[in-house]
Amino acid sequence: MLDRVIKLLSGDLEPGGQDYGPFQRRFVAAAVLLVEASQFDSGSKDENRRRIIDFMQSMFHFRQEVAAQVLELAELRFANTLDDWVFAEAVRSGFSAVEREELLAMLWELVYHDGRLLRLEAQLMEKLADELGLLPDAAESARMVALARSSQVRERDAED
């Protein structure tokens, strides 16, 4: 990571000049934001990874193995990036407003998964909604959808 910072500061590396392999930049960017949103969750890393893979399968219609490959790449990108702006910009330019709202709902679901909302999580989500170019009403709608979904999942888990 320090090498990347030095290269960025010296101008030897462009912030957006990343290799996304065979995957479209917008999908990797969306996965990076999902990884970022899961960082504060108290669940296990494996559980968070499964949820992100499920989200990618649902939203992007990826097969499980493709979603897992995109997630691996996203985890590397997240670990080697100083700011999420480049990923939020790729999502904003690569997805429609409806798709961005659905992605924000998924991000909120990751945040709500453990049943608690940290101040840092709320600040991150507010920042991401803005960076994704969503209007306040759309951002609030995404949050409410996620809250309802999260409540349903917790109720189902309690019954099992």
Image (tube, helix red, strand yellow):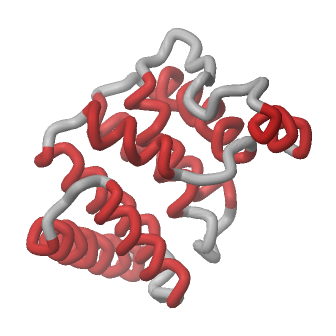
| Relative height, residue 62 to residue 154 (above, below) | above
State the residue at coordinates (30%, 64%). Answer: 129
**Is 84 placed left or right of 108 in the picture?**
right
**Is 46 placed left or right of 61 in the picture?**
right
Residue 23: percent from left, percent from top: 47, 17
Camera-side residue of 122 and 70? 122
Residue 148, quarter of the rendered image: bottom left
Outermost residue on the front side: it is: 10
Residue 108, quarter of the rendered image: bottom left
**Is 140 placed left or right of 57 in the picture?**
left
State the residue at coordinates (19%, 60%). Answer: 134
**Is 76 placed left or right of 61 in the picture?**
right
State the residue at coordinates (47%, 42%). Answer: 87
Residue 123: percent from left, percent from top: 45, 80
Q: Quarter holding the N terminus?
A: top right
Camera-side residue of 143 and 97? 97
Residue 104: percent from left, percent from top: 30, 59
| Relative height, residue 135 to residue 87 (above, below) | below
Outermost residue on the top side: it is: 22
| Relative height, residue 1 to residue 154 (above, below) | above
Number of disc labels: 0
Residue 4: percent from left, percent from top: 82, 37
Q: Quarter holding the C terminus?
A: bottom left
State the residue at coordinates (43%, 81%). Answer: 122
Camera-side residue of 152 and 111? 111
